[in-house]
Amino acid sequence: MTRATKTYVSETVSRLKPSGIRRFFDLAASMDGVISLGVGEPDFITSWNVREACILSLEQGHTSYTANAGLMELREEISSYLLRKFQVKYCPEGEVLVTVGASQALDLALRAIINPGDEVIIVEPSFVSYGPLVTLAGGTPIPVRTEGTDEFKLRPQQILQALTERTKAILLCSPNNPTGTVLNKEELAAIAHIANMHDLLVISDEIYAELTYDENYTSFAAVGGMRERTILVSGFSKGFAMTGWRLGFVAAPEEIMQAMLKIHQYAMMCAPTMAQYGAIEALKNGEHDVEEMRKSYRRRRNYFVQSLNEIGLRCHMPGGAFYAFPSIRETGLTSEQFAEQLLLKEKVAVVPGSVFGENGEGYVRCSYASSLEQLQEATKRMRRFLLQL
Ligand code: PMP
């Protein structure tokens, strides 16, 4: 076979679709005067004391690898953070692992537990990585479609309908990206009941745990009996405004942790050392700054979601993260048409709901991690856009 007709790329990777978010970023980046509500990251710069701790570590010459699982001091801080925040106890020695973002934690969790053909239930709409990561780990993602009319809550009945002999785990995300939906303690307990009855693991992506605006939030691991079934994934990107640091963590019972550690030590060695020094400071002294950021997001959420509803884009009040997910059904446009036309005509970038799964069609994701002035201008432009339709 000649070079021209042969592909060297694996069939699994060839079949993966590229992430749909990128195309809009690239288009928006090529235009002037765009207000971007597209990106999924905080608009804050990491707190100075955290940056300073990182700089100090470099000055002191801490430039080598750390232990595979991460600096012991950081694992201890993570362990006391989880205890303080959720009253759930993890041993820093064998149950906590520092990763390259929550992204790597998700990848490790899936690769550690999936046998070929195992099924993992994922919520749809959800974060774009879940399906591909399950596939890359050799499993089959099984989407469970949550409904806009039900504020995109994952309901026990929907999980029961998706269960088969091959179901290994549920991948939960609360607060959810892109819907902002938070599952409260009672809703988590109902899912826990199914996990117990059907002997399932739960990978709980809690990357937005710091950005919840409702007192009734908790970690899935803190729900009665669930610690042993939970792989708790979290990190510093969102709540601590540290996306570029690439630092996350995973907490899990020892057997699963040992499996994840094995993959991690071959594939990654350890997370970046200087970022780990920054993260120690973030956990030790970051509470006040996180609270200030949370208050600021809450204010912007209240303003923006109310404004969307006022201009005719129906949107539930999201309990967490920094996303609003309004319905654009009444415009008669697909979410992709809506996003493209809004960008070209009014220079506001949003993400079409369809990139988050079939069930995201009819919605767009707007990040409100922008200044109030920008949000005001964006809603003005969106109103004008809707009037022109
Ligand atoms: N999970 C969800 C739900 C996310 O939205 C993101 C980031 N967009 C991640 C995980 C990955 O976060 P990190 O930067 O820690 O890799």
Image (cartoon, rainbow, N blue to C red):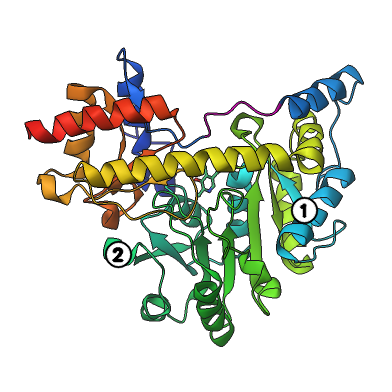
* Circle 1 SS class: helix
Residue 68 position, x and y percent, is 81, 45
Q: Nearer the viewer, residue 305 or 106?
A: 305
Work out whether 193 lies above or below 43: below
Number of other residues with Cα within 10 Å of mark 2, as a class: few under 14, some 14 to 19, many 20 or more: some
Q: Residue at x 51, y 35 (%)?
A: 41
Please report the bounds of the magenta region as a residue range.
42-47
Q: Which residue is mark 2?
A: 147
Q: Earlier in the sequence, mark 1 or mark 2?
A: 1
Q: Which amino acid type is shown beneath numbered disc 1?
A: Tyr
**Quarter of the rendered image showing ligand 1:** top right
Classify residue 164 by image quadrant.
bottom left
Q: Which residue is mark 1?
A: 81
Q: Which amino acid type is shown beneath numbered disc 2?
A: Glu
- Tell me if residue 67 is in the magenta stretch: no
Q: In the current view of this chain or complex, which residue is farthest to the top?
A: 32
Q: Residue at x 70, y 72 (%)?
A: 227
